[in-house]
Every structure is written in C-alpha cells, then in structure tokens.
Image: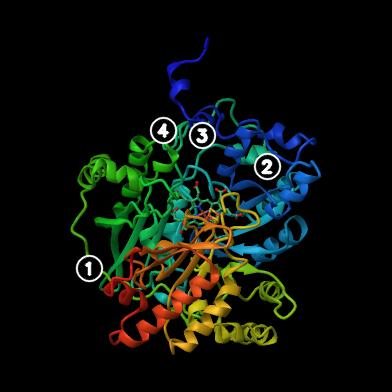
Amino acid sequence: MAGTDQKDLKETIAEKAKRTSNGLRGTLADSLKDEHTGSLRDTDQLLVKFHGIYQQDDRDRRREREERKLDKLYSFMIRVRIPGGFIGPVHWEMAQNIAGKYSTGTIKITTRQTIQLHGILKSNLKPTIKSFNEVFLDSIAACGDVNRNVTTTANPASSPHHDEINNLAKEISKMLLPKTRAYYEVWLDSEKLVEKTEEDPLYRDVYLPRKFKIGVALPPWNDVDIFTNDIGLIAIEENGKIIGYNVAAGGGLGTTHGNEKTYARLATVLGFVPKESVLKVVYEIVTVQRDFGNRDDRKLSRLKYTIDNMGLEEFKKEVEKRSSISFQSIKPYSFKTRSDQYGWAQDAKGAWHFTLFVENGLVTDSEDRKLKTALYEVAKTRRAAFRFTCNQNVIFADIKTSDVPVIEEIIRKYKLQEINETASLVRKNSMACVALNTCPLALAEGQRYLPLLLDKVDAVVTKNNLNNEPITFRMTGCPNGCARPYNAEIGLIGTAYGKYNLHLGADCNGTRLNKKYRENLEESEILQELDSLFARFNREKNTGESFGDFCNRAGLTGS
Ligand code: SRM
Ligand code: SF4
C-alpha cells in the first residue's frame, strides 16, 4: 500500500472526507456541473450536508425505476438555518416562492424550529440558495458534523426575556459557524478570497465527530425539549432579570435497533454559570467534544457517549479547565409544559402572537384547507413575522395591536382558528418525522401516516373519556428519534413497514425518558394496546396525574 500512511489506515470515510475537503469545498463545484447524473459524487454527498443540503431519492419510485433499469430519482432537501426560529414576512414570502418554483411546493417546519424544502433537482440547487441569499437566509451548518440550528422557547408571550434568549441563540449560532467561505464560493459564485483554507480555530480541518445541537429554554416552558440537546441552557431569572443559565449537557436520542451500545439519553445538568460566562462555557464544551469525541464509530460519537466515557466529573473538570470558569450549584427551576400555547397571546411589550397548529409541520394546500395560501397572505400584509416552534407549529408573531384585525381577517377567511379548535388535544400534542418517501433511513411511515392513525386513536381516547388529557404522542419511521419519541408519553418507533415499537412512561414535561413496552406492533395491535391502557388510566389515575406518570407508576414500561 505505497503512499498510504498510518492515519489513512485508521481513518473512517467521513473523517477523511472532512480532513481532505479543503474547507468543505471537496469537488462540489465539479459535481454540480456534471449533467450526466442527478447525483453528486460520493464524498460530495457527505460534504454537502455541512451546507445544509441532503441528497435523497424518491423511495416510492425506487422499484418502478429499478424495473425500468433507471437510476434512482435523485433530488435534494435543503434545511435553512434559522436560530430561534424567527423570520420576517419577506423571508416567508420568498420561502414560498422558492418552494413553488424549485421544490415539491410543500414547506416542512421541522422539530428544530426551522424549515426544509424537498425534491429540489441538482440543477436547481444554486438558484434556490441564491434566492434565499437575496433575503439573507442561508443553510450553512444546518446539517453536518458542526453545531446545528440553535433552538429557543418559541413564544415571545412566554416571558419578557424572550428577546434576550433569542439574541443568545443567534450569538451561539454565529460563534459556532464554520469559518470557511466555501458556501459563498460554491453556491453564490463569490470570488475565491484566499488560496489556502481559512483558519478555523474551533473546527480546524476535523470539524466535530458528529452533529451537535444546542437549545435555550425559558422555564416554565419546555417546548424546546431542552434535555434532548447536546447542550441545553436553562435561563434563570432573579428579580426580573436573567442572571445566567443552568447548563445541561449530553442529551441525544438516536439509537440503532440491535446495537445495544447505543441509547437515548437526556442531558445532565452540570451547574449554573452567570450570563457573561455562558458563551465561553458553550464554546469549550464543543472543543471538549471535538477533542475527546469518538471518531472511529459514528454510532457512538455524540457528546452523550463522550460524557459517559469520560465520566461526568472528569468532563466537567475539562470544561472548567478550558474555560477557566467553575460551575456553580444548580439553581432551582421547573418546567410546566412542552405544549405550544395555541391561539392569541400578548407579550410584555404589548405585541400579539397567534400560534397555529400545523399538523406535522406540513405547510401545504389541500382541497379543504388552504394553509399555504393563508400563510402567504399573512406574509403579504407585512404586519406579522413568523416564528417556528419545536413542536412543528407556526406563530404569526410580533403583531401590533392596531394590526391584529388585519391578521384576524385572514385567520377567519381561512378558518385557521377552527384548526386549533377542532384538533384533539392528543393531536395537538403529536409530532411525526418526515420518514417516507424522502428519508433514506426510514423503516416505516411517519408524517404521512400519523394523521390517519390519530383519527383512530382519537376514537379510542373519546371512548375512554380522556378528551381532556394532553397526552404527548410522537412517531418516527426509525430509531433515530427525529420527532423525539423517546421522551413522549406515547412513543411509536418504526421497526419495519407498518410496524412500530410502543414506548411508554415519559413525563409530560420532557424530563424523563420512556421505555419500550411492546415491540413490532401493527396498527390493530397499537389500537388494542392503547384501548386497554387508556381504560386502565381512566380507572386508576390519581387526581392530576398525567398518562406518562401513570404508566411509570403502574410499571407499564417493559415487555
Ligand atoms: Fe433527524 C437524520 C429529519 C430532528 C436525530 N433526520 C435525519 C435525516 C437527515 C436522514 C439522513 O440522515 O439522511 C432526516 C431527513 C428526512 C427528510 O427527508 O427530510 C432527518 N431530523 C429530521 C427532521 C426534519 C424531522 C422532522 O420531521 O422535523 C428534523 C430536522 C431538525 C432540524 O431542523 O435541524 C430532525 N433528528 C432530529 C431530532 C430532534 C431534535 O434535534 O430536536 C433528533 C433527535 C435528537 C438527537 O439529535 O439525538 C434527530 N436525525 C437524527 C439522527 C440520529 C442521530 C444520532 O445521534 O444517532 C439521524 C441519523 C444520523 O445522524 O445518522 C437523523
Ligand atoms: Fe428519517 Fe428516522 Fe429521522 Fe424519521 S426518525 S426522519 S425515519 S432518520
């Protein structure tokens, strides 16, 4: 093996792709020009994720294309970077225009407060990114082994400190962006600014071993599902001011069926840091993960494994040493809900916000519901901004009192309030991931199936007189956990087409994981199990006890 050094022998394909990428450029420019295929070169498929783009193919059409001896039907998904989930009306209007012109037309609000477009052809990638850039939106680091979209408690009416945590999310996002100009060169045809790869003291040429996620929560609201993040910052308020943050680390949900070494984990609260120290601490947690994270096995490389391998105390000490900041004792806090506050709410500054339930985050027009048209009209008024929630919903936000009637008129015209009012509580507390037909990892359906299943679940709920119970119900098409099913009161995790593991026993505020209760259930079995569980819950629950707490108390958490 002449010319192969020790490093090459040990290095995984992903690590080598990063190290030799020339600042994430790879051969992307050439891949894009190649008109013989709708696909990118193999290594470029890995690198393009750091630019917020995934290569996919239409899985519904795989068999037919195979029979016709055709290549897969390749297209791309773009995920925009929107820290805190806030964009203006101009941005939303542009997103819809782009969606109509270059993608399937549907916009997906994700579980991390941003939006995705699917079905973009290779030749339309550059025009798409250029159009987003016209309104100063980008997709840098929305995916890849770097820090991803930073999430926050969504509704400004939750606290007078909402602006402050939003600004923090933006600062963190900016601080942890890769320094390379590759995005601008590849997609926006910017001139090459430097011959050599740009200096990046954080990511260097190795980036992180794996994806990295950060959220900021304002108790008592936990819509951001703070403990599922690699770093969760919990704002602590004293005397009407945010004085600092309890820092939690090591959350992550992805597991692999059959790989016992993988597990879902909620973040552990390390301690309190004053607000002037929080950026430094966040930065150094990231450098510890960069230097200590597992680069040999991507299944075991998230921060949760790094912490468990190092030991919590050792990990804490390393962060303290690097940041020269000592964690103080954890300050008291408590979460009371993960639900969005549907309908109108006014914030401390007097602005109004209308939260709309968007089932599984899919903004589209159907025969009986013109959701996309309604959102476009709201944007056109320029009287409301848009805030996405980690529950895949949208808030028409920051509306002056004098502008409320204009927005109300659109809400009435498109019967949006009716969506909020007619959806059952379980449905309003449900989420599904994308899964089929675009997700290459899906074993079962997600967002296409959950609404149909919930029609039947709703009937079982009603039969058992539980219509007033806001039970969290989450479904994913595989064990990666994109709709955070591992801390839902009812979690359904796809194992094969039409089959799901049923998990029970998480609490309603997102502070306890559930456990696997039954395996490989088909729809009829799911409904049967839920019927008997709901009947028992109705009979035996204590006053005020949530379904998850009941399952946990009753030991309904294991096969
Ligand atoms: Fe996710 C991979 C969709 C939130 C854990 N996720 C994927 C991919 C990109 C599949 C792939 O690798 O090719 C999916 C694209 C499907 C498609 O066609 O669009 C995908 N994940 C999503 C979204 C769109 C689900 C949704 O319906 O909203 C969410 C986008 C969030 C965003 O805007 O950034 C999404 N993914 C999550 C979350 C929830 C969260 O972050 O709050 C998780 C669990 C938390 C965590 O990270 O542990 C999550 N996604 C994963 C994993 C497992 C990671 C792991 O540590 O094992 C994968 C697979 C992987 O990384 O190898 C994955
Ligand atoms: Fe795809 Fe699995 Fe994530 Fe669902 S949970 S989007 S099936 S990776």
Confirm whether residue 366 shows in the render.
yes
Residue 356 lies in what quarter of the image? bottom right
Mark 4 sits on what residue?
Answer: 296
Q: Earlier in the sequence, mark 4 or mark 3?
A: 3
The quadrant in which residue 51 appears is: top right
Answer above or below: position of 378 versus 465. Answer: above
Dot 1 amino acid type:
Pro
Mark 1 or 4: in front is 4
Position of residue 261 measured from the top left corner of the image (x, y, whole percent): 36, 45
Q: Which one is earlier in the sequence, the residue at label 1 or at label 4?
A: 4
Mark 1–mark 2 distance (CA, rounded to whole Å): 47 Å
- Which residue is tagged 3? 14
Does the CB distance between marks 3 and 2 fall below 8 Å? no
Asked if residue 509 lies left or right of residue 467, the reply is left
Residue at point 73% right, 44% down?
72
Label 4 and label 3: CA atoms lie apart by 10 Å
